[in-house]
Image (spheres, helix red, strand yellow):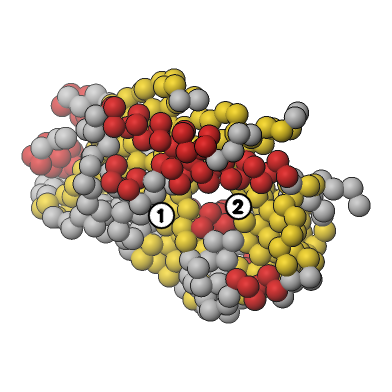
Amino acid sequence: MLKQEQLEQLLTRAMQSNADFAEIFEEEGTNEGISMLNDKVESVNRNYKAGIGIRLYQGVQSVYGYSNQMDAASLQALVDDLRDALGRKQVDISVSLKEEIIENRHPVQIDPIDAPLQEKVALLQRADQAAKAVDEKIVKTQTGLSSVRQHVQISNSEGKLVRDTRIRTRLRVSAYAQQDEDMQSGFDAPGASKGLEFFEEATPESIGQEASRIALVLLEAKDCPSGKMPVVIDNGFGGVIFHEACGHALEATAVAKNQSVFAGKQGKQIASPKVTAYDDGTIPNAWGSENIDDEGNLQQRRCLIENGILKTYMIDRLNGRRMGLSSTGSSRRQSYKYEPTSRMSNTFIAAGQDSFEDMIGSIKKGLYAKKMGGGSVNPQTGEFNFAVNEGYLIENGQITIPVKGASLIGTGAEILMNIDMVGTNLERGTGMCGASSGSIPTDVGQPAIRVSSITVGGTANE
């Protein structure tokens, strides 16, 4: 990392231009991945990266450059290129920095990068053995452990200097079940902003068993019927629909450019009164949490929707300028190679007061989406299409047979208004989110919810 004096010199040089703001983002990090196939280690990869990203603002325009060359001459040349883009100007300015000491909300007990390789391989072996022990139909397993340690230092022309260390780890299991010619797979992959101590609560055995359970259910599943019907979407990763179909449309990246269905709707009802939703980057040790965002602002708990009313957006500094609003600490990026923008952290629908039993019992014919998969969404229109990885028919108020090939189709605005029951069993699930500033770790979550009517795509012939 650069010393304070070096940063002050670079920022002073950057401000000798038409820029009204300059920012430096530094990163040093180690990523490690261990993968195993059927109890045999396939690969162990460890990558070290270090670099710097420099950004200059002029009003609502920005220029950005990055480099992994950290010598003085290379950094001065990078700053000069950015100054030339905005136009140089001789001004009598000197940037002085004052370091901010921040509280670490996400303490780590066992750093996964420093832990012995044998201990990490043993975690994967435990997951593999537990997955195979569920049933003899489990014929193949793939396991993996991903860990990251990232040091960041952020400084800017307003005098900010702040540092943070982010540590995360995640264990994933894919289990494959086979019966005759039919093969199905199940997947589970929890993670946290913790070290290896995380796997004392989310044990490798429980992860392996869950992956196998899903695979075995899908072996018995029938083709799903299609049509409009009520759907109960379960807790945890079920929140991916809110994340994709609604969350992205609440990011200032889209809102500031009027490319969101929710642009200009702050203070208006956009959801059922049953719905309150948050994006909270402060949850201790959560997968999507950080002490500061990637512009050096303290992370926040942001109430996006309260009782159906849109309260705020997720806003970064640049898009905040475009909107005439302050940052909400929502600026994130994958690495120094990406210019940051507004992104989600841990996004979830808050717990309600309805029971899961009442949701199921209220439906004569519908779908229970227990596990959601991936999908696609258009932030401008909110139109989405999501796969249901594990689903069941609901018939006469009872969960009956498992079904496969189901998908949920609709728009974010429609689904928000059609949520008529919200459960008490809030949980969050782990994921990665890709957008213009790269791939970042995010949690999604919700309690079980009932959507009164939504289009279900299926594969059954009717």
- Left or right, 80 with reference to 280: left
| Residue type, label 1 | Ser
Give me the disc on residue 301: none
Give me the disc on residue 345: 1
Instruction: Indicate the quadrant where residue 423 lies.
Output: bottom right
Above or below, comparing residue 375 to residue 382 in the picture: above
Q: Which x, y percent locates residue 74?
A: 22, 24
Residue under the image location 17 percent in, 24 percent down: 71
Instruction: Indicate the quadrant where residue 13 lies.
Output: top left
Number of numbered discs present? Answer: 2
- Left or right, 159 with reference to 315: left
Q: Secondary structure at mark 1?
A: loop
Residue under the image location 71 percent in, 56 percent down: 392
- Left or right, 372 with reference to 427: right
Q: Which x, y percent locates residue 65?
A: 34, 34
| Residue type, label 2 | Lys
Mark before the other along the chain sequence, 2 or 1: 1
Residue under the image location 62 percent in, 41 percent down: 215
Give me the disc on residue 371: 2
Above or below, comparing residue 450 to residue 128 in the picture: below
Q: Secondary structure at mark 2?
A: strand
